[in-house]
Amino acid sequence: MPDHPERNDVTTQKTLQVPEVHCDHCKTSLESAVGALNGVSTVEVDVPNATIEVDYDNDAVSLDTIKTTIEEQGYAVFG
């Protein structure tokens, strides 16, 4: 039996609607802000569909923290 329990490295993937995303500046701004959060492994903004897809470690960062970060950038977020 191992001395340390194995950690389940499970990444959560979530797609959020961000209707006010309409340009590359929006994409860059959101990807930089959300990507800087500890626990976020990938973030991709899809401008034509006005969505943001986030892969994150639920043990390190909450979905509410991600949503708050998006809102702090000046965007409404749903999902």
Image: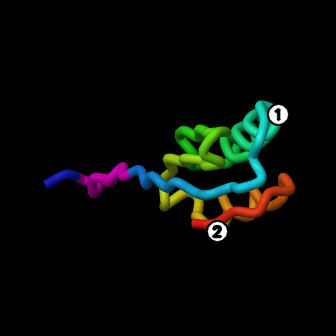
The quarter of the displayed image where residue 45 is located: top right
Image point (84%, 52%), residue name: 73
Residue 24 coordinates in the image, percent (x, y): 77, 31
In the image, 42 versus 10, the foreground residue is 42
Q: Identify whether 44 is placed above or below 5.
A: above
Residue drawn at the location 69% of the way across and 47% of the way down = 34
Dot 2 falls on a residue whose secondary structure is: helix
> Quadrant of the rendered structure where residue 4 is?
bottom left
Q: In which quarter of the image is the C terminus?
A: bottom right
Is mark 2 in CB contact (under 8 Å) with mark 1?
no
Please say whether residue 47 is one of the residues in the magenta stretch: no
> For the residues carrying marks 2 and 1, which lies nearer the camera in this image?
1
Please give the range of residues in magenta: 3-10
- In the displayed structure, does residue 26 sit left or right of residue 60? right
Disc 1 secondary structure class? helix
Q: Is residue 8 above or below residue 28?
A: below
State the CA–CA distance, disc 2 to disc 1. 23 Å
| Residue 14 x/y as whole percent | 49, 55
Question: How many C-alpha atoms fall within 10 Å of the one at disc 2: few (<14), some, or many (≥20)?
Answer: few
Dot 1, how many residues are within 10 Å of its Cα: few (below 14), some (14-19), or many (20+)?
few
Residue under circle 1?
25
Q: Which amino acid type is marked by label 2?
A: Asp
Percent position (x, y) of residue 19? 71, 56
| Residue 64, disc | 2
On the rendered image, what quadrant is the N terminus found in?
bottom left
Whether residue 2 is visible here, answered yes or no, is: yes
Q: Residue at x 58, y 64 (%)?
A: 62
**59 to the left or right of 27:** left
Q: Quadrant of residue 33?
A: top right
